[in-house]
Image (tube, rainbow, N blue to C red):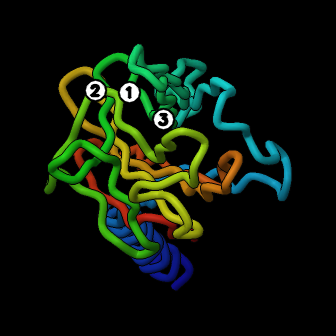
Amino acid sequence: MNSVFLETFSKRLLLWICVLSLYSCSTTKDTTVYNNLPTDSLGIIPYWQKYYYDLNYDGKKDFEFRSQTIVSQSEPPSVSSNLYIVSLDSNEVQCISSGEPFPFQNNTLISNVGNWSKTSSALVKQEDGGPWFGLWANIGERNLGLRLKIRDSYYYGWIKLYCYKNGYKIISSAFNNNANAPLYAGVNP
C-alpha cells in the first residue's frame, strides 16, 4: 500500500509541476519600465537649458530638449524662440501633420498609428517676448508619444511634461520593453 501511495503521489506531483510550468510559460509579463520622478527632483527646467533624456535607461541619450532663438535682420528686428524635442539616432516623436509633437492625454494608446517624425519639433513658441504658444502651451500635464528604433524593431514610450510660462517639468516616463507593442500614455501600474 505504501508503494501504491508513493506512485500515485509522484504521478500527481509530476502532473501539477507540468500544469504550473505550462501556465507560467503562457502568461505574459508586463515589461513596461516606469519612472516616476520624485516631486521637484528635476524642478522646472528653463526653456533655454539643454536637457537630454534616456527613455529606456541604457545609458544612451535618446531625446534632447533644446531651445532656439532667432533674431531677424528686419527693421525693427523680431525675436522668436522655440522649445524643441530632438530625436537622437533613429528615434521618433509622434506629431500632428504639421510636425508639432502631439500632446497625449492619459490613457491614450501610443502605437505605430499616426505621424512619426525624426526631425526636431517645437513644443512651444514665443514671438518678441510675448506669451508662449503652441499645442503644449497652457494645457497642463500631457504626454509625449515616443518610439525608439533598436535594431529592426520599435519600442514605444512616453514622457509626461508640464509646460510653464518659463520652463517645463518632466514628471514621469514609461518605456515598453516588448518590441512593436503599444502602451497607454501616462498610465502607471
Ranked by sequence position, the earlier of labels 2 and 1 is 1
Residue 146 vs residue 5, the one in the foreground: 146
Q: Residue at x 69, y 27 (%)?
A: 49
User: Split into 4 quadrants, where in the image is the C terminus?
Assistant: bottom right
Query: Residue 56 shows which numbered tag?
Result: none
Evaluate if marks 3 and 2 touch, with contact meaning CB atoms under 8 Å apart: no
Q: Does residue 161 appear anywhere in the picture?
A: yes
Mark 1 secondary-structure assignment: strand
Residue 46 vs residue 31, the one in the foreground: 46
Query: Residue 82 shows which numbered tag?
Result: 3
- On the image, the x and y values in percent for residue 92 come to 30, 34
Query: Residue 119 shows which numbered tag?
Result: 2
Q: CA distance from mark 1 to mark 3?
A: 16 Å
Ranked by sequence position, the earlier of labels 1 and 3 is 3
Q: Residue at x 56, y 57 (%)?
A: 160
Ranked by sequence position, the earlier of labels 3 and 2 is 3
| Badge nearest the viewer, 1 or 3 | 3
- On the image, the x and y values in percent for residue 164 come to 67, 56
Mark 2 secondary-structure assignment: loop
Give the residue pinned by disc 1. 87
Identify the amino acid type marked 1: Ser
Evaluate if marks 2 and 1 touch, with contact meaning CB atoms under 8 Å apart: yes
Q: Residue at x 22, y 53 (%)?
A: 96
| Badge nearest the viewer, 3 or 2 | 3
